Amino acid sequence: MNPLQRDKMETEELKVLIRKASGFFIADGQLWKKDSRAKHKLVIDEEKQLDLLRQAHDDLGHKGVFITRTQILE
């Protein structure tokens, strides 16, 4: 590959990375995803997501997937 083409590709990839990264911020040592309605979402490690989903499901009294998901996203 031509070095100039590679540099251009890397520049485009960098632009994409910056655009995606601008949708997140760090507060109090935690990663948050920005929300246009100021309802920012805490980013949870993948290995903790299932445990939190189960806990929320149990805490809500086994109301089902839709209600559990709705409550978690609020």
Image (cartoon, rainbow, N blue to C red):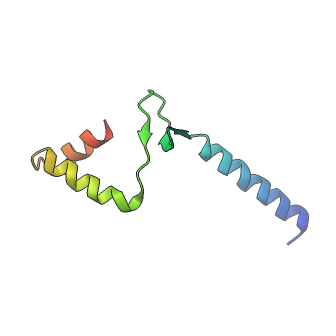
Q: Is residue 26 visible?
A: yes
Q: Is residue 64 visible?
A: no
For the point 67% across and 46% down, the residue is 18
* Residue lying furthest bottom: 1
For this rendering, which residue is in front, 11 or 27? 27
| Residue 13 pos. (x, y %) | 71, 55
| Residue 65 pos. (x, y %) | 20, 51
Where 15 falls versus 2 (above or below)? above
Horizontally, is 25 left or right of 72 in the view? Answer: right
| Residue 37 pos. (x, y %) | 44, 27
Q: Quadrant of the C terminus?
A: top left
Quarter of the image holding residue 10?
A: bottom right
Horizontally, is 25 left or right of 70 in the view? Answer: right
For the point 42% across and 39% down, the residue is 41
For the point 26% across and 41% down, the residue is 70
For the point 42% across and 56% down, the residue is 45
Where 33 falls versus 16 (above or below)? above
